[in-house]
Image: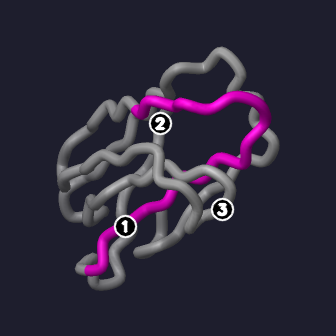
Amino acid sequence: ANEDNSYIGFKDIDLTGIKSIKISAFSQKGQTAGGKLEVRLGSPTGTLVGEGNVPEMRMMPIKVDVNTNGSQNVYFVFRNPNAEGKPLMGLST
């Protein structure tokens, strides 16, 4: 994630029978700023279904409960308005 409000989206993901999503996010001191990872449906500003904090210098598993069925556009939105130009975090799985 390069900056506050950057995102990655996946179109038409079939969430039928899916109860949760697990994400492994990481931040490395001196290289990334850390921040918050939001999971949204529909668009980068769509329905917020979960979020987790990724502090600087940590790897955090984030579990998001998903209470929907059918195909959805799923977006991971990266937030940190105080990053001062540093990348925020990376995703490993």
Residue at the spot of label 3: 43
Residue at the spot of label 2: 92
Instruction: From the top left corner, tell me how far across and down residue 26 is, in percent.
Output: 33, 44
Q: Is residue 78 left or right of residue 61?
A: right
Q: Residues within 10 Å of mark 1 (few under 14, many from 20)?
A: many
Instruction: Decide whether residue 2 is among the magenta residues.
Output: no
Instruction: Decide whether residue 77 is among the magenta residues.
Output: yes
Q: Is residue 25 left or right of residue 34?
A: right
Identity of the residue drawn at 30% across and 79% down = 81
Q: Magenta segment, which residues?
A: 64-81
Instruction: From the top left corner, tell me how far across and down residue 90 is, in percent.
Output: 43, 50
Q: CA distance from mark 3 to mark 2?
A: 22 Å
Do residues under tags 1 and 3 come within 8 Å of each other at their CB atoms?
A: no
Element type at mark 3: loop
Identity of the residue drawn at 43% across and 62% down = 78
Instruction: From the top left corner, tell me how far across and down residue 28 is, in percent.
Output: 25, 52
Question: The disc labelled 3 sits on which kind of residue?
Answer: Ser
Foreground of the two, 56 or 38: 38
Q: Earlier in the sequence, mark 3 or mark 2?
A: 3
Identity of the residue drawn at 64% across and 47% down = 74
